[in-house]
Amino acid sequence: MDALLDAYSEAVAGAAERASPAVVKIETRKPGSRGRSGGSGSGFIFAPDGLTLTNSHVVQGAERVTVSLQDGRTRTAHVVGDDPATDLAVLRIAGNGDDGAYPTVELGESATLRPGQVVIAIGNPYGFQYTVTAGVVSAVGRSMRSQSGRLIDNVVQTDAALNPGNSGGPLLDSRGRVVGVNNAIILPAQGICFAIPIDTAKIVVTALLRDGRVRRSYLGLGGQTVRIARRIVHDLTLGDDTGVLVTNVEPESPAAQAGLVDGDVIVRFNDQPVKSVDDLHRVLTEEHIGVPAKLVLVRGGAVRTLPIVPAETRPKAA
């Protein structure tokens, strides 16, 4: 038993030692704060030129971003891009030309995670820098809603303790590779914490570095998930008893141009069933921008198919 505990301790300590130099404390100043700190969080450097990954909510709306490294260096950083839909943001730290390459952490894979696997979290909860906690993967494949309202899929649940200030820090495997980006806790529950899977983060990082944002398609409608009467499901052979009720249509949007009206119930996008608003969000990805598609909907007790061309989601003004 002692040998097992020693091996566990060595794995946790070794992973923390390998990753900690690349973990940063992030402090922000918001407009109008008059020099006072606007908030804090964590992040980790994944490229030697200072590219850093954190949560979008940590830096969103910040006028100034400052990062502190474990070796005592403090540097300003600027936001390369952020994606509130997945609560991820990429920063670039200034000053590597004077100090040499920044320490980095290795990115692992989240697809192979399984419940019971040991994981380690590093962050700056309540300002206590480089705090290490350990636990296990409690579950995989969870879903969590971001602050933008979109659902984040395949979220990792862990009981490695997280607290305010851990947001944006790395969740590591026993080899010190990042498998998730620590994101949220459920209050007042204990031991229920979540991390965005690193496989999702890799996709988002690529898009942010390329475009400064994650490109998605949109239809230009407001909707809500509704249950469809069993008689209509049977008579129209719909297959599913829920869909998306159109509650409003934006003028001159793809939905308006396609002829959607309030009261339509969308049940399919191309070959994909649409049983909820989240289903519709999932299918409106970059590859559908400008590509003709078909919406299957229920209107006036009959099934109709409307051609539609999704447009690119318009970036929100700063």
Image: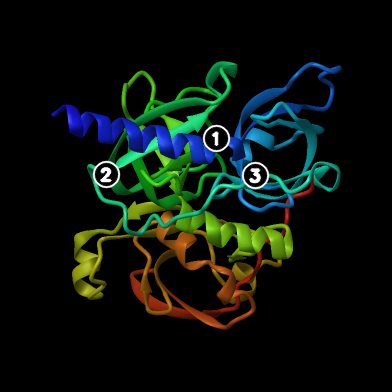
Q: Secondary structure at mark 1?
A: helix
Residue tagged by mark 1? 20
Q: Which mark is residue 117?
A: 2
Nearest to the observer: residue 262 or residue 60: 60
**Residue 246, visible in the rendered structure:** no
The local secondary structure at tag 3 comes to loop
Q: Earlier in the sequence, mark 1 or mark 2?
A: 1
Residues at marks 3 and 1 touching, judged by CB atoms closer than 8 Å? no
Which mark, residue 5? Answer: none
Rendering coords of residue 281 (x, y %) = 49, 59
At 73% from the left and 58% from the top, the residue drawn is 212
* 1 or 2: mark nearer the eye: 1
Res 52 visible: yes
Q: Name the kind of residue labelled 2 in the image.
A: Gln
The image shows residue 170, relative to residue 240, as above or below, that is above
| Residue 103 numbered tag | 3
Give residue 122's position: percent from left, percent from top.
49, 32
- Which comes sooner in the sequence, label 3 or label 1? 1
Instruction: Give me the C-alpha separation between circle 1 and circle 2.
Output: 20 Å
Residue 47 position within the rendered picture, expressed as x and y whole percent measured from the top left? 66, 53
Q: Quadrant of residue 258?
A: bottom right
Q: Residues within 10 Å of mark 1 (few under 14, many from 20)?
A: many
Left of 277 or right of it: where is 28? right
Give me the C-alpha separation between circle 3 and circle 1. 9 Å
Amino acid type at image mark 1:
Ser
